[in-house]
Amino acid sequence: MSVDYVLQTTDLVKEFKGFTAVDNVNLNVERGTIHALIGPNGAGKTTVFNLLTKFLIPTTGQILFNGDDITQMRSAEIARKGVIRSFQISAVFPHLTVLENVRIALQRKEGNSFHFWKSDKILNKLDARALELLESVGLQDHANSITVDQPYGRKRALEIATTLALDPELMLLDEPTQGMGHEDVEVVADLIKRVAQDRTILMVEHNLHVVSKLADKITVLQRGAILTEGDYATVSADPRVREAYLGVAEDENDDAGDASEAVEAKETV
Ligand SMILES: Nc1ncnc2c1ncn2[C@@H]1O[C@H](COP(=O)(O)OP(=O)(O)OP(=O)(O)O)[C@@H](O)[C@H]1O
Ligand SMILES: [Mg+2]
C-alpha cells in the first residue's frame, strides 16, 4: 500500500429508525491533504462528521485512524489521539479576550488548568505560544480585544486558532465559511490553506469556489452514498454532480446564492 491514509472508513452505515442517512461510505483521507466532503442538503455530510467525531455511533462499519480501529472510541479519546472538530471548541468565551481564549485552549491540551494560574513562568510560556498561534491566523493585532466585539470573520479565525492549539493531526471543519460575506470567505479560505501545511483537513463545504481553491480531493455524497470522487476538475465535469446541485438551487431558497455560485464555479473549470 503506497498511499498513506490518516483516516479511512469501511462500509460506514448510519440508520435512523430504518432511514439510511449514511449508506456504505468508504472514505479514504490521505495524509497531508485537504479533503472536501460535498453534496446537496440532506446528503449525509454532517451525519458522517458526527460519526467520525463520535457524536453518533455507526449502525455498521468501521472507522480507522492511522490504521487503528477507533469505531468504538469516545469523542474525548479520539480528540486526544489528534482528531479535532473545529466547532467542538468554538464555544469561545465571548467576554474574554482573543488571546485568553487561545490560552484556555492551550491549557486544555496541557491539562494543567489548575496549576498554571499559579505560575507566572507557565503563564508566560502559554502566552507566547498563544500569540504565535494568533499570528498564524492573522489575529496578532487583536490579541487584547474582547472576543464578542470582533467581526464574524475574525471569530472564525479565532476558532481555527483554538483548534490549532490542540495540535490536531486531523482537523474536521464543518462548513467553515458558512454565513460569511465574500471577503471573509477569501480570508478564511487562505487561512485554511495556510494551516493545512503540516496536517490533514477534512471539511464539509457548500461553497464550491472554496472547494475548488482548497481541496486536493473531493468526495460527493448524495442520499447518504458516495456519488463520485476525485479532484475538482474530475468531479465538476460529472453531469451527476451538476444535477445534484441544480436540485439544491431549485429547492433551497436560502442556499440559492451558494448553489448558483457553485454552478458558476463549475462552469469556469
Ligand atoms: N438524528 C436524526 N434522526 C433522523 N434523521 C436524521 C437525523 N440526523 C440526520 N437525519 C437525516 O439524515 C439525512 C442526512 O442529514 P445530514 O444533516 O447529515 O445532511 P447534510 O448533508 O449535512 O445536509 P446539510 O447540507 O443540510 O447540512 C437527512 O435526511 C436528515 O433528515
Ligand atoms: Mg450538514
Image (spheres, rainbow, N blue to C red):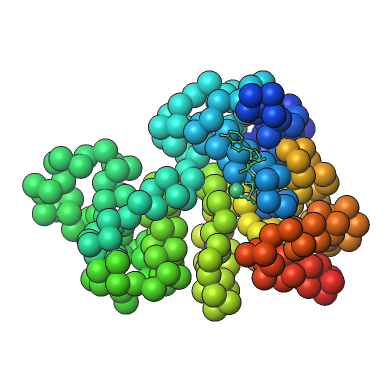
Q: Residue at x 36, y 65 (%)?
A: 134
Q: Which residue is drawn at 22% across and 61% down?
A: 96
Quarter holding the N terminus?
top right
Q: Residue furthest left?
A: 118
Q: Is residue 88 above or below residue 136?
A: above
Q: Is residue 160 above or below residue 114?
A: below
Q: Who is closer to the viewer here, 265 or 252?
A: 252
Q: Which residue is drawn at 45% across and 50% down?
A: 87
Number of numbered tags placed on the structure image: 0
Q: Residue at x 52, y 36 (%)?
A: 53
Q: Indicate left or right for 27 with 100 as reference.
A: right
To which quarter of the image does residue 206 belong? bottom right
Image coords of residue 182 (percent x, y) = 58, 77
Q: Indicate left or right for 134 with 215 as reference.
A: left
Q: Who is closer to the viewer here, 44 or 30?
A: 44
Q: Indicate left or right for 128 with 254 as reference.
A: left
Whether residue 232 is visible to the viewer of this picture, yes or no, is: no
Image coords of residue 30 (percent x, y) = 68, 44
Image coords of residue 131 (percent x, y) = 31, 65
Q: Is residue 222 above or below residue 198?
A: above
Q: Indicate left or right for 62 with 147 as reference.
A: right
Whether residue 243 is visible to the viewer of this picture, yes or no, is: yes
Q: Is residue 16 above or below residue 86?
A: above
Image coords of residue 106 (percent x, y) = 30, 49
Quarter holding the C terminus?
bottom right
To which quarter of the image does residue 235 belong? bottom right
Q: Who is closer to the viewer here, 84 or 247?
A: 247
